[in-house]
Protein backbone atom coordinates (compact mmCIF):
# COMPACT_ATOMS: atom_id res chain seq x y z
CA UNK A 1 0.00 0.00 0.00
CA UNK A 2 1.14 3.53 -0.71
CA UNK A 3 1.47 5.90 2.24
CA UNK A 4 -1.50 8.07 3.07
CA UNK A 5 -0.40 11.27 1.40
CA UNK A 6 -2.31 14.40 2.30
CA UNK A 7 -5.22 14.94 -0.08
CA UNK A 8 -5.57 18.26 -1.82
CA UNK A 9 -9.32 18.84 -2.02
CA UNK A 10 -9.01 21.54 -4.68
CA UNK A 11 -7.02 19.18 -6.86
CA UNK A 12 -9.10 16.13 -6.03
CA UNK A 13 -12.18 17.77 -7.51
CA UNK A 14 -10.49 17.58 -10.89
CA UNK A 15 -10.23 13.78 -10.70
CA UNK A 16 -13.13 11.48 -11.52
CA UNK A 17 -14.28 10.52 -8.02
CA UNK A 18 -16.71 7.95 -9.42
CA UNK A 19 -13.96 5.85 -10.93
CA UNK A 20 -12.11 3.31 -8.78
CA UNK A 21 -8.98 3.03 -10.87
CA UNK A 22 -5.24 3.36 -10.56
CA UNK A 23 -5.11 6.04 -13.22
CA UNK A 24 -3.73 9.33 -11.97
CA UNK A 25 -4.87 12.73 -13.16
CA UNK A 26 -2.11 15.30 -13.21
CA UNK A 27 -2.93 18.82 -12.08
CA UNK A 28 -0.55 21.38 -13.58
CA UNK A 29 -0.75 24.10 -10.96
CA UNK A 30 2.41 25.57 -12.44
CA UNK A 31 2.94 25.43 -16.22
CA UNK A 32 6.73 25.62 -16.09
CA UNK A 33 9.12 24.16 -13.54
CA UNK A 34 12.33 26.06 -12.99
CA UNK A 35 15.47 25.07 -11.11
CA UNK A 36 14.36 24.51 -7.49
CA UNK A 37 17.72 25.80 -6.27
CA UNK A 38 16.79 29.28 -7.48
CA UNK A 39 13.08 29.16 -6.65
CA UNK A 40 11.50 30.84 -3.67
CA UNK A 41 9.62 28.77 -1.11
CA UNK A 42 6.34 30.13 -2.47
CA UNK A 43 7.29 29.15 -6.02
CA UNK A 44 8.21 25.63 -4.91
CA UNK A 45 4.79 25.32 -3.24
CA UNK A 46 3.26 25.89 -6.68
CA UNK A 47 4.81 22.68 -8.06
CA UNK A 48 2.44 20.31 -9.88
CA UNK A 49 0.54 17.63 -7.97
CA UNK A 50 -0.20 14.03 -8.86
CA UNK A 51 -3.69 12.84 -8.04
CA UNK A 52 -4.76 9.20 -8.07
CA UNK A 53 -7.51 6.95 -6.75
CA UNK A 54 -6.76 4.20 -4.28
CA UNK A 55 -9.62 2.06 -3.01
CA UNK A 56 -12.01 4.67 -4.30
CA UNK A 57 -10.28 7.49 -2.45
CA UNK A 58 -8.65 10.42 -4.22
CA UNK A 59 -5.10 11.14 -3.06
CA UNK A 60 -2.49 13.63 -4.12
CA UNK A 61 1.16 14.43 -3.58
CA UNK A 62 3.57 17.11 -4.72
CA UNK A 63 5.72 16.39 -7.75
CA UNK A 64 9.47 16.95 -7.37
CA UNK A 65 11.79 17.25 -10.35
CA UNK A 66 15.13 18.92 -10.00
CA UNK A 67 15.81 18.53 -13.72
CA UNK A 68 12.73 20.61 -14.50
CA UNK A 69 10.65 17.91 -16.22
CA UNK A 70 6.87 17.88 -15.97
CA UNK A 71 5.08 14.90 -14.41
CA UNK A 72 3.58 12.25 -16.70
CA UNK A 73 -0.01 12.85 -17.73
CA UNK A 74 -1.02 9.24 -17.06
CA UNK A 75 0.18 7.13 -14.15
CA UNK A 76 -0.67 3.63 -12.98
CA UNK A 77 -0.02 2.01 -9.62
CA UNK A 78 2.73 -0.62 -9.96
CA UNK A 79 4.19 -3.26 -7.66
CA UNK A 80 6.32 -6.42 -7.63
CA UNK A 81 3.84 -8.27 -9.84
CA UNK A 82 4.43 -6.03 -12.84
CA UNK A 83 6.35 -7.68 -15.67
CA UNK A 84 9.27 -5.86 -17.27
CA UNK A 85 7.75 -6.05 -20.76
CA UNK A 86 4.53 -4.45 -19.52
CA UNK A 87 6.45 -1.76 -17.65
CA UNK A 88 8.54 -1.04 -20.73
CA UNK A 89 5.45 -0.75 -22.95
CA UNK A 90 3.68 1.60 -20.54
CA UNK A 91 6.79 3.73 -20.03
CA UNK A 92 7.29 4.08 -23.79
CA UNK A 93 3.67 5.22 -24.07
CA UNK A 94 4.36 7.94 -21.51
CA UNK A 95 2.51 6.28 -18.62
CA UNK A 96 4.14 6.78 -15.24
CA UNK A 97 4.40 3.83 -12.85
CA UNK A 98 3.89 4.83 -9.20
CA UNK A 99 5.70 2.12 -7.29
CA UNK A 100 4.28 0.63 -4.09
CA UNK A 101 6.28 -2.62 -3.94
CA UNK A 102 9.77 -3.56 -2.79
CA UNK A 103 12.31 -0.80 -3.45
CA UNK A 104 15.05 -3.16 -4.63
CA UNK A 105 12.62 -4.71 -7.09
CA UNK A 106 11.96 -1.24 -8.46
CA UNK A 107 15.69 -0.85 -9.08
CA UNK A 108 15.77 -4.15 -10.93
CA UNK A 109 12.74 -3.14 -12.99
CA UNK A 110 14.43 0.12 -13.98
CA UNK A 111 17.48 -1.85 -15.11
CA UNK A 112 15.23 -4.17 -17.13
CA UNK A 113 13.58 -1.18 -18.84
CA UNK A 114 17.03 0.24 -19.62
CA UNK A 115 18.11 -3.05 -21.21
CA UNK A 116 15.06 -3.01 -23.45
CA UNK A 117 15.71 0.58 -24.47
CA UNK A 118 19.33 -0.20 -25.31
CA UNK A 119 18.49 -3.34 -27.26
CA UNK A 120 18.92 -3.19 -31.03
CA UNK A 121 15.90 -1.39 -32.52
CA UNK A 122 13.62 -3.32 -34.83
CA UNK A 123 13.34 -0.57 -37.41
CA UNK A 124 16.24 0.53 -39.54
CA UNK A 125 18.50 2.97 -37.77
CA UNK A 126 18.61 6.48 -39.26
CA UNK A 127 22.01 7.31 -40.71
CA UNK A 128 23.26 10.85 -40.14
CA UNK A 129 24.53 12.77 -43.16
CA UNK A 130 26.70 15.17 -41.13
CA UNK A 131 28.43 15.30 -37.77
CA UNK A 132 25.92 17.88 -36.55
CA UNK A 133 23.03 15.63 -37.55
CA UNK A 134 24.68 12.70 -35.78
CA UNK A 135 24.93 14.80 -32.62
CA UNK A 136 21.28 15.87 -32.76
CA UNK A 137 20.15 12.28 -33.36
CA UNK A 138 22.26 11.19 -30.39
CA UNK A 139 20.75 13.91 -28.20
CA UNK A 140 17.26 12.98 -29.35
CA UNK A 141 17.86 9.33 -28.47
CA UNK A 142 19.31 10.24 -25.08
CA UNK A 143 16.36 12.51 -24.33
CA UNK A 144 13.86 9.81 -25.25
CA UNK A 145 15.77 7.30 -23.12
CA UNK A 146 15.69 9.67 -20.16
CA UNK A 147 11.95 10.26 -20.59
CA UNK A 148 11.21 6.54 -20.67
CA UNK A 149 13.37 5.75 -17.64
CA UNK A 150 11.76 8.69 -15.85
CA UNK A 151 8.38 6.95 -15.86
CA UNK A 152 9.16 4.85 -12.77
CA UNK A 153 8.03 6.94 -9.78
CA UNK A 154 8.84 6.63 -6.08
CA UNK A 155 6.82 8.03 -3.11
CA UNK A 156 8.53 9.99 -0.33
CA UNK A 157 7.39 11.02 3.11
CA UNK A 158 7.68 14.63 4.24
CA UNK A 159 10.95 13.83 6.03
CA UNK A 160 12.50 12.42 2.80
CA UNK A 161 12.16 8.80 3.91
CA UNK A 162 10.83 6.28 1.38
CA UNK A 163 7.81 4.27 2.59
CA UNK A 164 8.76 1.11 0.69
CA UNK A 165 10.23 -2.24 1.78
CA UNK A 166 14.06 -2.39 1.71
CA UNK A 167 14.33 1.30 0.84
CA UNK A 168 17.71 2.94 1.55
CA UNK A 169 18.24 5.88 3.87
CA UNK A 170 18.23 8.87 1.52
CA UNK A 171 17.16 11.58 3.94
CA UNK A 172 20.34 13.63 3.91
CA UNK A 173 20.92 13.18 0.17
CA UNK A 174 17.41 14.42 -0.66
CA UNK A 175 17.58 17.19 1.92
CA UNK A 176 20.74 18.52 0.23
CA UNK A 177 18.81 18.83 -3.03
CA UNK A 178 15.24 19.62 -2.01
CA UNK A 179 15.79 21.28 1.35
CA UNK A 180 13.29 20.98 4.18
CA UNK A 181 9.82 19.79 3.20
CA UNK A 182 6.52 19.75 5.06
CA UNK A 183 4.53 17.32 2.95
CA UNK A 184 4.99 14.03 1.06
CA UNK A 185 6.02 14.07 -2.58
CA UNK A 186 6.73 11.89 -5.59
CA UNK A 187 9.88 11.82 -7.73
CA UNK A 188 11.39 9.54 -10.33
CA UNK A 189 13.60 6.64 -9.30
CA UNK A 190 16.13 7.73 -11.90
CA UNK A 191 16.43 11.20 -10.39
CA UNK A 192 16.81 9.62 -6.95
CA UNK A 193 19.73 7.55 -8.24
CA UNK A 194 21.35 10.73 -9.51
CA UNK A 195 20.84 12.38 -6.14
CA UNK A 196 22.40 9.41 -4.33
CA UNK A 197 25.38 9.40 -6.70
CA UNK A 198 25.92 13.13 -6.25
CA UNK A 199 25.70 12.71 -2.47
CA UNK A 200 28.57 10.20 -2.61
CA UNK A 201 30.62 12.67 -4.66
CA UNK A 202 29.88 15.35 -2.08
CA UNK A 203 30.86 13.08 0.81
CA UNK A 204 34.02 11.60 -0.68
CA UNK A 205 35.23 14.41 -2.90
CA UNK A 206 37.37 14.32 -6.00
CA UNK A 207 41.15 14.35 -5.83
CA UNK A 208 42.69 17.20 -7.86
CA UNK A 209 46.41 16.48 -8.35
CA UNK A 210 47.20 20.06 -9.39
CA UNK A 211 45.77 21.25 -6.06
CA UNK A 212 47.08 18.35 -3.96
CA UNK A 213 43.63 18.46 -2.40
CA UNK A 214 40.07 17.29 -2.88
CA UNK A 215 37.14 19.20 -4.34
CA UNK A 216 33.61 18.31 -3.21
CA UNK A 217 31.04 18.85 -5.98
CA UNK A 218 27.43 19.54 -5.03
CA UNK A 219 24.44 18.12 -6.85
CA UNK A 220 23.85 20.04 -10.07
CA UNK A 221 27.35 21.57 -10.14
CA UNK A 222 29.78 20.38 -12.81
CA UNK A 223 32.37 18.05 -11.30
CA UNK A 224 35.98 18.69 -12.46
CA UNK A 225 36.55 15.09 -13.55
CA UNK A 226 38.50 16.07 -16.68
CA UNK A 227 41.90 17.00 -15.33
CA UNK A 228 43.44 18.25 -18.58
CA UNK A 229 41.84 21.69 -18.45
CA UNK A 230 42.91 22.12 -14.81
CA UNK A 231 46.49 21.23 -15.77
CA UNK A 232 46.41 23.90 -18.49
CA UNK A 233 45.60 26.55 -15.88
CA UNK A 234 48.21 25.10 -13.52
CA UNK A 235 51.04 25.20 -16.07
CA UNK A 236 50.45 28.43 -18.03
CA UNK A 237 52.67 31.38 -17.12
CA UNK A 238 50.98 34.40 -15.57
CA UNK A 239 51.02 37.78 -17.35
CA UNK A 240 53.82 40.00 -15.95
CA UNK A 241 51.35 42.70 -14.91
CA UNK A 242 50.10 40.40 -12.12
CA UNK A 243 53.24 41.33 -10.19
CA UNK A 244 51.87 44.89 -9.97
CA UNK A 245 48.19 44.05 -9.33
CA UNK A 246 47.76 40.59 -7.82
CA UNK A 247 44.09 40.16 -8.77
CA UNK A 248 42.19 37.65 -10.93
CA UNK A 249 38.56 37.00 -11.88
CA UNK A 250 37.24 33.45 -12.28
CA UNK A 251 34.10 33.64 -14.44
CA UNK A 252 31.57 30.84 -13.89
CA UNK A 253 33.48 29.32 -10.99
CA UNK A 254 31.32 26.20 -10.44
CA UNK A 255 33.03 24.18 -7.71
CA UNK A 256 35.65 26.91 -7.29
CA UNK A 257 38.44 24.61 -8.49
CA UNK A 258 40.12 27.12 -10.84
CA UNK A 259 39.87 29.96 -8.33
CA UNK A 260 41.50 27.71 -5.73
CA UNK A 261 44.26 26.79 -8.17
CA UNK A 262 44.99 30.44 -8.96
CA UNK A 263 45.16 31.21 -5.24
CA UNK A 264 47.51 28.29 -4.62
CA UNK A 265 49.71 29.65 -7.41
CA UNK A 266 50.14 32.86 -5.45
CA UNK A 267 47.54 35.37 -6.65
CA UNK A 268 46.64 37.37 -3.56
CA UNK A 269 43.02 38.25 -4.38
CA UNK A 270 40.51 36.47 -6.59
CA UNK A 271 36.87 37.26 -7.34
CA UNK A 272 34.95 34.14 -8.41
CA UNK A 273 31.52 34.59 -9.99
CA UNK A 274 28.56 32.40 -10.82
CA UNK A 275 24.83 32.98 -11.17
CA UNK A 276 23.66 29.55 -9.98
CA UNK A 277 22.97 29.38 -6.26
CA UNK A 278 24.12 25.77 -5.98
CA UNK A 279 27.46 26.64 -7.57
CA UNK A 280 27.90 29.60 -5.22
CA UNK A 281 27.23 27.42 -2.18
CA UNK A 282 29.53 24.70 -3.51
CA UNK A 283 32.41 27.07 -4.25
CA UNK A 284 32.16 28.75 -0.85
CA UNK A 285 32.17 25.40 0.94
CA UNK A 286 35.17 24.13 -1.03
CA UNK A 287 37.17 27.31 -0.53
CA UNK A 288 36.44 27.25 3.18
CA UNK A 289 37.69 23.66 3.38
CA UNK A 290 40.86 24.72 1.58
CA UNK A 291 41.25 27.74 3.89
CA UNK A 292 41.15 30.06 0.88
CA UNK A 293 37.88 31.80 1.66
CA UNK A 294 39.60 34.99 2.87
CA UNK A 295 41.68 35.13 -0.31
CA UNK A 296 38.82 34.40 -2.70
CA UNK A 297 35.55 36.31 -2.79
CA UNK A 298 32.60 34.40 -4.29
CA UNK A 299 29.92 36.69 -5.71
CA UNK A 300 26.70 36.14 -7.63
CA UNK A 301 26.97 37.76 -11.05
CA UNK A 302 26.13 37.17 -14.67
CA UNK A 303 29.69 36.73 -15.91
CA UNK A 304 31.85 39.66 -14.74
CA UNK A 305 32.10 41.37 -11.36
CA UNK A 306 32.68 45.10 -11.15
CA UNK A 307 36.07 46.50 -12.01
CA UNK A 308 39.10 45.28 -13.96
CA UNK A 309 41.72 42.60 -13.39
CA UNK A 310 45.04 41.70 -15.02
CA UNK A 311 43.95 38.06 -15.33
CA UNK A 312 40.44 36.85 -16.15
CA UNK A 313 39.79 33.12 -16.51
CA UNK A 314 36.70 31.46 -17.96
CA UNK A 315 35.86 27.82 -18.63
CA UNK A 316 32.40 28.04 -20.28
CA UNK A 317 30.26 25.07 -21.32
CA UNK A 318 31.90 23.65 -24.42
CA UNK A 319 28.94 22.53 -26.56
CA UNK A 320 26.60 25.15 -28.11
CA UNK A 321 23.38 23.19 -27.75
CA UNK A 322 20.18 23.58 -25.82
CA UNK A 323 20.18 21.84 -22.41
CA UNK A 324 17.30 19.41 -21.94
CA UNK A 325 17.21 20.00 -18.18
CA UNK A 326 18.45 22.48 -15.60
CA UNK A 327 21.25 20.07 -14.69
CA UNK A 328 22.79 20.32 -18.18
CA UNK A 329 23.55 24.04 -18.13
CA UNK A 330 27.15 23.33 -17.12
CA UNK A 331 27.65 21.22 -20.24
CA UNK A 332 25.58 22.93 -22.94
CA UNK A 333 25.72 26.62 -23.85
CA UNK A 334 22.78 27.46 -26.17
CA UNK A 335 23.88 29.70 -29.05
CA UNK A 336 27.28 30.02 -27.31
CA UNK A 337 25.77 32.68 -25.04
CA UNK A 338 28.28 32.38 -22.21
CA UNK A 339 31.24 32.05 -24.57
CA UNK A 340 30.20 35.12 -26.55
CA UNK A 341 29.31 37.02 -23.39
CA UNK A 342 32.76 36.40 -21.97
CA UNK A 343 34.58 37.38 -25.15
CA UNK A 344 32.46 40.47 -25.79
CA UNK A 345 32.81 41.72 -22.20
CA UNK A 346 36.47 40.90 -21.69
CA UNK A 347 37.91 44.17 -23.05
CA UNK A 348 35.80 46.20 -20.63
CA UNK A 349 37.13 44.32 -17.58
CA UNK A 350 40.73 43.59 -18.54
CA UNK A 351 43.58 45.74 -17.27
CA UNK A 352 46.07 47.05 -19.86
CA UNK A 353 48.73 44.39 -20.52
CA UNK A 354 46.43 41.85 -18.86
CA UNK A 355 45.29 38.51 -20.22
CA UNK A 356 42.02 36.68 -20.60
CA UNK A 357 42.29 32.90 -20.46
CA UNK A 358 39.58 31.06 -22.35
CA UNK A 359 39.58 27.32 -21.60
CA UNK A 360 37.53 25.45 -24.17
CA UNK A 361 37.47 22.25 -26.18
CA UNK A 362 37.09 22.10 -29.96
CA UNK A 363 34.54 19.26 -29.70
CA UNK A 364 31.84 21.61 -31.02
CA UNK A 365 33.90 22.11 -34.18
CA UNK A 366 34.22 18.36 -34.77
CA UNK A 367 30.48 18.00 -34.20
CA UNK A 368 29.74 20.70 -36.78
CA UNK A 369 28.07 22.94 -34.20
CA UNK A 370 30.54 25.83 -34.36
CA UNK A 371 33.39 26.61 -36.75
CA UNK A 372 36.86 27.80 -35.87
CA UNK A 373 36.23 30.80 -38.11
CA UNK A 374 33.19 31.80 -36.03
CA UNK A 375 35.27 31.70 -32.86
CA UNK A 376 38.12 33.71 -34.41
CA UNK A 377 35.70 36.30 -35.79
CA UNK A 378 34.10 36.75 -32.34
CA UNK A 379 37.54 37.26 -30.77
CA UNK A 380 38.43 39.80 -33.45
CA UNK A 381 35.12 41.68 -33.16
CA UNK A 382 35.53 41.87 -29.36
CA UNK A 383 38.71 43.91 -29.75
CA UNK A 384 41.00 41.09 -28.68
CA UNK A 385 44.15 39.48 -30.05
CA UNK A 386 45.41 35.95 -29.54
CA UNK A 387 48.79 35.81 -27.84
CA UNK A 388 49.01 32.06 -28.19
CA UNK A 389 47.05 28.84 -27.69
CA UNK A 390 48.14 25.95 -25.50
CA UNK A 391 46.68 22.56 -26.39
CA UNK A 392 46.28 19.26 -24.61
CA UNK A 393 44.71 15.98 -25.67
CA UNK A 394 41.84 14.77 -23.43
CA UNK A 395 42.33 11.48 -21.61
CA UNK A 396 38.76 10.65 -20.57
CA UNK A 397 37.43 7.11 -21.32
CA UNK A 398 35.09 8.15 -24.15
CA UNK A 399 38.08 9.11 -26.30
CA UNK A 400 38.77 5.41 -26.92
CA UNK A 401 35.18 4.13 -26.75
CA UNK A 402 34.45 3.05 -30.31
CA UNK A 403 30.85 2.16 -29.39
CA UNK A 404 30.13 5.83 -28.61
CA UNK A 405 28.04 7.36 -31.45
CA UNK A 406 30.20 10.48 -31.18
CA UNK A 407 33.49 8.56 -31.12
CA UNK A 408 34.96 10.15 -34.26
CA UNK A 409 34.47 13.66 -32.89
CA UNK A 410 35.64 12.76 -29.40
CA UNK A 411 38.79 11.02 -30.66
CA UNK A 412 39.79 14.20 -32.53
CA UNK A 413 39.01 16.57 -29.63
CA UNK A 414 41.61 19.01 -28.32
CA UNK A 415 41.26 21.12 -25.17
CA UNK A 416 42.92 24.53 -25.37
CA UNK A 417 43.77 27.54 -23.25
CA UNK A 418 43.55 30.64 -25.43
CA UNK A 419 45.65 33.54 -24.09
CA UNK A 420 43.82 36.71 -25.14
CA UNK A 421 44.84 40.35 -24.80
CA UNK A 422 43.54 43.80 -25.74
CA UNK A 423 44.34 45.05 -29.25
Image (cartoon, helix red, strand yellow):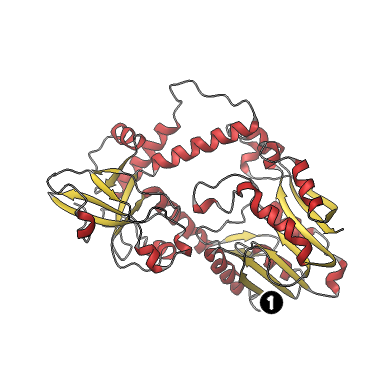
Q: Residues within 10 Å of mark 1 (few under 14, many from 20)?
A: some
Asked whether residue 390 is in view, the answer is yes
Numbered disc total:
1
Is label 1 in a helix, a strand or a loop? loop
Quadrant for residue 346, please give it.
bottom right
Give the residue pinned by disc 1: 295
Quadrant for residue 374, please give it.
top right
Horizontally, is 321 left or right of 378 in the view?
left
Q: From this view, report whether residue 247 is shown above or below residue 380.
A: below
Provide residue 136's location: percent of width, then percent of height: 57, 35
Horizontally, is 280 left or right of 370 in the view?
left
Q: In terms of depth relative to the viewer, which is nearer, 251 or 206? A: 251
Q: In terms of depth relative to the viewer, which is nearer, 205 or 366? A: 366
Quick one: quadrant of the C terminus?
bottom right
Residue occupying the point 65% across, 74% down: 297
Residue occupying the point 79% across, 59% down: 235
Amino acid sequence: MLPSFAISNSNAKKADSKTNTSLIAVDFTSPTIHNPATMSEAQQDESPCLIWHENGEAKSAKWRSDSGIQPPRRVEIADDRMKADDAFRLACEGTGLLWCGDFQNARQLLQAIARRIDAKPRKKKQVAATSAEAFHLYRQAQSQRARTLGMLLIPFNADHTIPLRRAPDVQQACKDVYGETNEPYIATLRSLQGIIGAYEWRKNGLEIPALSARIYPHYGVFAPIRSEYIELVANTSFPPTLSNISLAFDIGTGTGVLAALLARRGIKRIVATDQDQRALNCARENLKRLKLDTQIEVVQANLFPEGRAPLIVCNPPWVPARPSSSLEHAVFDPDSRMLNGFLNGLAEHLEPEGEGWLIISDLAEHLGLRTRTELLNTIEAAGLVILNKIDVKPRHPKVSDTSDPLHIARSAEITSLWRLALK
